[in-house]
Amino acid sequence: MTTVIVRPEPDCSELVDQLTRQGLAAIACPLLSFAPGRDLPTFATLLGSLPADSILVAVSPRAVAFAHQALQRQEMAWPSDCHYVAVGQRTAHEWQAVCGQTVQYPVREDSEGMLALAPFMAVKEAQVVILRGDSGRDMMAKTLSDQGAQVHYCETYRRQWAIEPLVSQVVSWPKDTIDTVVITSGQQLAYFDQLITLSGQHWLRQCRILVPSKRIQDQATGLDFDTITTVDSVANSALVHTLLRLSKTGLSDD
């Protein structure tokens, strides 16, 4: 069993290392890197203008890290009178460490899980700021807007994709041993599908694919991936646990 890891660095290499220590073979396939987002210069001003009980949402540790760096440059602290909501446990813990506030997160690490949390039970006229990359969480924003919230996107980072440099590498992957692919976002899934097409390695669609949510599971089904496992988390610890379980049961979910 060899697993291809499709997620950004440094998480990609960290997951490969964790799997290797557990005796599982893995190949790193980081399709993208990151740069500061276009909204960072005005982020401190936006944060300072928010009324009490506004809701701040972070979609990843990366969104938190870039936003916090921007506030540090402005010598500004995170507000103490807002609600903090993170997409998952890791993001919540890293955000709480730098903001000093309580950060809520759902058991189900996706937009639907976040929307079920208490801060979103009555959002009419509430101000909601979503810290994200150059795209993402459109469904969440639409749902909140439909309920009367005023939603602001804050692009704290932007993605830089690297498809072409990986094409020749994919051709050299060990076709007979790769049977699993881990993909941690819908955008990465779309680009990985493009990578498969460009490299001519269509057999990769027959591998088991691990994804973090039902939404991405549906996307994978639409791209003709046949065997899909939903992990309900993007944390490396959860992915390692699932891959170990699958390795011991012969890649069966039964």
Image: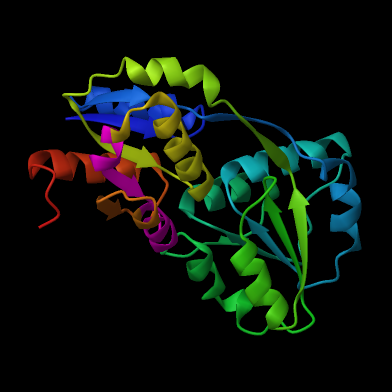
- Residue at 75% x, 47% y is 155
The percent coordinates of residue 105 (x first, y second) are 51, 62
Asked if residue 165 is among those painted magenta in the image, a careful observer would answer no
Asked if residue 216 is among those painted magenta in the image, a careful observer would answer yes
- Residue at 86% x, 65% y is 50
Q: Report whether 133 appears left or right of 189.
A: right
- Residue at 85% x, 34% y is 73
Q: Report whether 2 appears left or right of 159.
A: left
Could you say which is closer to the camera, residue 224 or residue 22?
224
- Residue at 29% x, 19% y is 173
The magenta segment? 203-220
Could you say which is closer to the camera, residue 150 or residue 174?
174
Q: Note whether 19 is above or below 136 in the view shown.
A: above
The percent coordinates of residue 3 (x first, y second) are 27, 31
Q: Which quadrant of the rendered structure holds the C terminus? A: bottom left
Quarter of the rendering containing residue 69: top right
Quarter of the rendering containing residue 192: top left
Q: Main secondary structure of the magenta part?
A: helix
